[in-house]
Image (cartoon, rainbow, N blue to C red):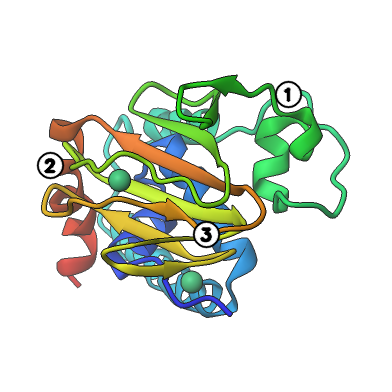
């Protein structure tokens, strides 16, 4: 059962096509596991459609077609897709990795922790982390926004317990020491962005919706 969900701001921004590719991946992966967030996203999709309809009524700017095409291009999936199979990774993540767990090329980053950086646009980065059961990730703060989605196993920190499908949203205010629960390796998708980028992003994203 999923207890930690996406915020409305992230769902709206995703629905409006305004998030960096790495964030899109985390949102799409959580939504593929979470009926509650999928339902909320569908309501934002409807809202977003209403915004576009009203914009069309007053005429589109000259560069809107180019901007829309650029957005579609940026959101295009990788050219080579491996066939999906049921596994640890939900569909959106299998598309990025090119398969399930066995397709990941892990690299050690010390303390028994391994990571694999996923290819995304440079606005933000996405990586898979594999933390042995019982291991703590060093205490850290955040210069920007960090999304951590659990795919296997579980971890706990000052904010609670996170199991498969749960997403932790940590920002500059959060300092935490995530610790993998004893047992199987904890595998997470972690997304981080550049600090200045996100500070200005959320207000900008919400603008079209707030105007309604
Ligand atoms: Zn959710
Ligand atoms: Zn963190």
Disc sitting over residue 79 in the figure: 1
- Disc tally is 3
Describe the element under mark 3 as helix, strand or loop. loop
- The answer to whether 34 is drawn above or below residue 129 in the figure is below
Q: Report if the beta carbon of the residue with label 2 is closer than 8 angstroms to ligand 2.
A: no
- The answer to whether 144 is drawn above or below residue 55 in the figure is above
Residue located at (50% from left, 32% from top) = 127
Q: Where's residue 117, x and y in %?
A: 52, 24
Q: Where's residue 192, x and y in %?
A: 33, 37
Residue located at (32% from left, 64% from top) = 51
Horizontal relation, residue 102 to residue 192: left or right: right
Sequence order check, earlier mark of 3 and 2: 3
Residue 52 visible to the viewer: no
The residue pinned by badge 3 equals: 181
- The answer to whether 157 is drawn above or below residue 124 in the figure is below
- The answer to whether 168 is drawn above or below residue 41 in the figure is above
Horizontal relation, residue 187 to residue 124: left or right: right
Badge 1: residue crowd in 10 Å (few <14, some 14–19, many ≥20): few
Disc 3 versus disc 2: nearer the observer:
3
Labelled pair 1, 2 in contact (Cβ < 8 Å): no
Residue located at (46% from left, 29% from top) = 111
In the picture, which quadrant includes the N terminus? bottom right
The residue pinned by badge 2 equals: 200
Describe the element under mark 2 as helix, strand or loop. helix
Sequence order check, earlier mark of 1 and 2: 1
Q: Which of 210 and 124 is in front in this view?
A: 124
Q: Where's residue 153, x and y in %?
A: 61, 58
Q: Where's residue 31, x and y in %?
A: 56, 64
Residue 102 visible to the viewer: yes
């Amino acid at each position: 059962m999923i207890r930690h969900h996406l915020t409305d701001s992230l769902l709206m921004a995703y629905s409006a096509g305004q998030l960096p590719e790495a964030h899109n991946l985390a949102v799409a992966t959580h939504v593929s596991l979470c009926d509650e967030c999928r339902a909320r996203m569908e309501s934002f999709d409807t809202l977003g459609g209403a915004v576009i309809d009203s914009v069309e009524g007053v005429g589109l700017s000259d560069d809107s077609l180019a901007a829309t095409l650029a957005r579609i291009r940026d959101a295009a999936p990788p050219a080579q897709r491996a066939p999906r199979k049921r596994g640890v990774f939900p569909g959106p993540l299998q598309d990025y990795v090119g398969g399930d767990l066995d397709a990941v090329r892990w690299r050690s980053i010390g303390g028994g922790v391994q990571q694999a950086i996923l290819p995304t646009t440079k606005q933000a980065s996405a990586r898979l982390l594999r933390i042995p059961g019982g291991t703590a990730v060093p205490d850290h703060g955040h210069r920007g926004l960090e999304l951590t989605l659990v795919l296997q196993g579980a971890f706990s920190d000052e904010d609670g317990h996170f199991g498969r499908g749960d997403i932790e949203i940590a920002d500059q205010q959060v300092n935490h020491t995530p610790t993998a629960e004893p047992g199987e390796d904890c595998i997470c998708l972690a997304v981080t962005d550049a600090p200045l980028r996100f500070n200005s992003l959320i207000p900008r994203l919400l603008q079209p919706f707030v105007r309604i």
